[in-house]
Image (tube, helix red, strand yellow):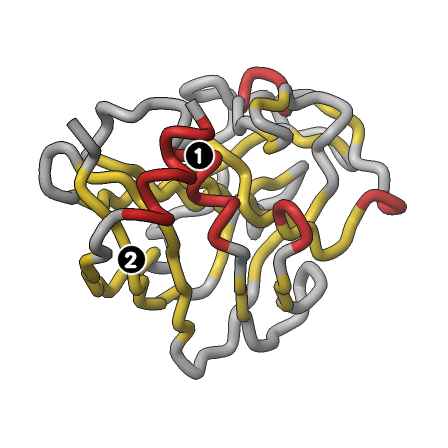
Amino acid sequence: MKHVVITACANGIRQKLSKSYLFPKPAMTCEWEKAGNLAPRNNYFQARIEQDEALSLPVGSIICDVKFNFDRQQFLYDDHFVLAFNGAVIASSYNFEKVLARKFDILRYDWANVAGMFWDHEAEGTFCVLGGSCAWPATDVAGTMNMSYDSIVFQRIMAEDLMRNEHALKFVSIGDNDDKDCEHSDVSFSLDVEYVSKPN
């Protein structure tokens, strides 16, 4: 269905929507051995906190492009994070390609596949989907955060379900073994979304 999305975005009249988001600093750290989390274990992905936000578009809309605008903020996380859009990993501080499945060449977030995975420090870094331009600090270091993607990223994600008009952003903070893990500072940004109406 990728060709349907690409054709619709190329030929349709684009409309725009802007919305602000906040993933606040969690009120707790990792809840060990709850809701799919494992017991503390050094250098393994044992627990996470997931936060979800919605993006609602008119029925019959097809997303063509999404731009992120980050506020001036000091971003801090412990130990790692994932940002997913409709389950597709668009940013992460660790390379999860060995355990996560791909669809349309984009990794799909699934905690069940991550839980208990060995933490290879060589796999840490700035992982931005499909050649996007991203920047954020290393784990436990405060710094700024920016993300920029080619429009094909969200068109591929949209092609997975053309009937979908309720979209989901998920921020996941992950830890291994101590009482500060799964923490992150506030993450705030706005989205500028371009979309068209699905052709008849």
- In the displayed structure, would residue 135 be above or below residue 80? below
Q: Is residue 103 left or right of residue 197?
A: right
Residue at (49% x, 34% y) in the render: 88
Q: Secondary structure at mark 2?
A: strand
Q: Secondary structure at mark 1?
A: helix
Q: Is residue 147 left or right of residue 3?
A: right
Q: Nearer the viewer, residue 53 or 3?
A: 3
Residue 80 visible? The answer is no
What residue occupies the far bottom of the structure in this picture?
72
- In the displayed structure, would residue 129 be above or below residue 66? above
Residue at (60% x, 33% y) in the render: 106
Q: Which quadrant is home to the C terminus?
A: top left
Residue 96 visible? The answer is yes
| Residue 38 image-quadrant placement | top right
Mark 1 or mark 2: name the one nearer the start of the chain: 1
**Amino acid beneath label 2:** Val
Q: CA distance from mark 1 to mark 2?
A: 14 Å
What residue occupies the far front of the structure in this picture?
11
Residue at (56% x, 52% y) in the render: 180
What residue occupies the far right of the structure in this picture?
122
Q: Where residue 192 sits in the image (x, y, percent)?
A: 30, 64
Q: Where residue 166 sits in the image (x, y, percent)?
A: 20, 34
Q: Which residue is mark 1?
A: 157
- In the displayed structure, would residue 31 be above or below residue 82? above
Mark 1 touching mark 2, by CB under 8 A?
no
| Residue 57 image-quadrant placement | top left
Q: Which residue is mark 2?
A: 193
Q: Nearer the viewer, residue 143 or 67?
A: 67
Q: Where residue 86 sits in the image (x, y, percent)?
A: 38, 33
